Amino acid sequence: MGSSGETGHVTGTADKDYNIIWFTEACLSNALRLETYIADAERAGDTELVEFFQRAQAASRKGAEEGKALLARRLAG
């Protein structure tokens, strides 16, 4: 099978759905990790870095919310 073929038979989930699930989990995991980075920057008194990581965390949360909504719509349809 070529690299462009559907591999959902391996996971039991269609590739496109699996990809949304993976993306959503990665965003959620990133948001959690960034919480630690924010705390580290706060302890160091680095306001610029705190704000940077907070923006990154907000973007990760947004990606997770969009991924969850997209997956829900597709699975319901």
Image (cartoon, grey):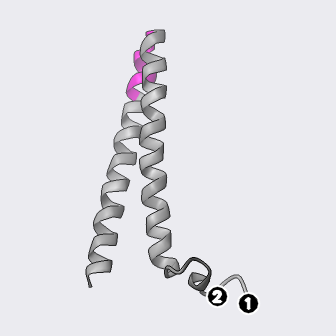
Q: How many marks?
A: 2
Q: Is residue 47 magenta?
A: yes
Q: Decide: is 54 above or below 14.
A: above
Mark linked to residue 5: 2
Mark linked to residue 1: 1
Q: Is residue 36 left or right of residue 74?
A: right
Residue at (37, 36) in percent of width and height: 55
Q: Is residue 11 left or right of residue 48?
A: right
- Stretch in magenta: 45-51
Q: SS at mark 2? A: loop
Between the residue at mark 2 and the residue at mark 1, the CA separation in whole angstroms equals 6 Å
Callout 1 amino acid: Met
Q: Are marks 2 and 1 in contact (CB under 8 Å)?
A: yes
Callout 2 amino acid: Gly
Q: Is residue 11 magenta?
A: no
Where in the figure is residue 8, as x and y percent of width and height?
Answer: 56, 82
Q: Quadrant of residue 64?
A: bottom left
Q: Decide: is 60 above or below 4.
A: above
Mark linked to residue 41: none
Main SS category, magenta section: helix
Residue at (34, 41) in percent of width and height: 58
Which residue extends farthest right?
1
Residue at (42, 31) in percent of width and height: 35
Where in the figure is residue 29, as x and y percent of width and height?
Answer: 47, 46
Where in the figure is residue 57, as x and y percent of width and height?
Answer: 39, 39
Q: SS at mark 1? A: loop
Q: Residues within 10 Å of mark 1 (few under 14, many from 20)?
A: few
